[in-house]
Image (cartoon, rainbow, N blue to C red):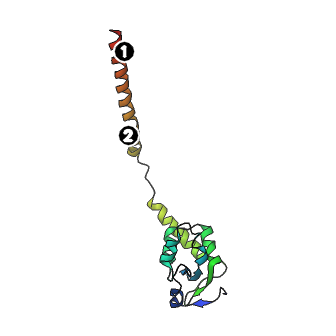
Amino acid sequence: MEKRQVFTLSQVAQHKSKKDCWLIINGRVLNVTKFLEEHPGGEEVLIESAGKDATKEFEDVGHSKAAKNLLLKYQVGYLQGYNVQEGGDAGDASSFKETKAREMTAFVVKDDPRTKYAAFVEFFVPILVATCFFGYRYISGAAQFSS
C-alpha cells in the first residue's frame, strides 16, 4: 500500500486482531501486525489499542526517538481529516519535549538540609548502636574469662 492512502476510522477499526493489527498514532495509520512479537512492551499492549487512535497511550509511555522513527516503517496511510506534516515530526518533537519538561518538574527534589541529616542519622545511628553492643559484649566476655 502507498503511504499517501487515506483511511477512515471505521476502516481502521476493522483491523483489530492478532493476525491483522492496525492502529493510529498522530494521524498516521500503522500496520503493526509484523511488529507484535518484537514490541518490548508485549503484543497485548498493541492489541488493546488495535483499530483505534493510540496517540495518547503512545505519548504517555514516552517512547524513544528510535521508536518514533519506527512509525514511518509501519505506516500504511493517514487518517481522514487529519493533517500530518511531511518531512519529519517537528511538531511531534516539540510536543514531546514539552511533555518531558513537565514530567521532569514533578520529580525535582528540593535540596533540604533536614533530609540529608535524616539520612545521616538513619544510617549511622544503627551502626553506632550495633558497635556499642558488640563492644560491650566483647569487653564483658573478656572480663568473664580473665576472672
User: Pointer 1: what residue?
Assistant: 142
Residue tagged by mark 2? 122
Q: Check the image and report above or below for 112 versus 129.
A: below
Residue 90, quarter of the rendered image: bottom right
Please tell me whether mark 1 sits on a helix, a strand or a loop: helix
Q: Nearer the viewer, residue 80 or 104?
A: 80
In the picture as drawn, the residue positioned furthest to the top comes out as 147
Query: Is 135 left, or right, of 7 in this rendering?
Result: left
Can you see residue 15? yes
Q: Tell me the quarter of the picture where residue 146 sits.
A: top left
**Which numbered mark, 2 or 1, is in the foreground of this view?**
1
The answer to whether the residues at label 2 and label 1 have Cβ atoms under 8 Å apart is no
**In percent of the image, x 58 and y 86: which residue is there?**
83
Q: Position of residue 106 (x, y in %)?
A: 44, 61
Q: CA distance from mark 2 to mark 1?
A: 31 Å
Disc 1 marks which amino acid? Ala
Residue 8 spot, x, y in % from top left: 54, 91
Q: Is residue 129 above or below residue 112?
A: above
Residue shown at 37%/25% (left/top)?
134
Query: Mark 1 packing: few (<14 Cα in 10 Å), some, or many (20+)?
Result: few
66 with respect to 122 (left or right): right
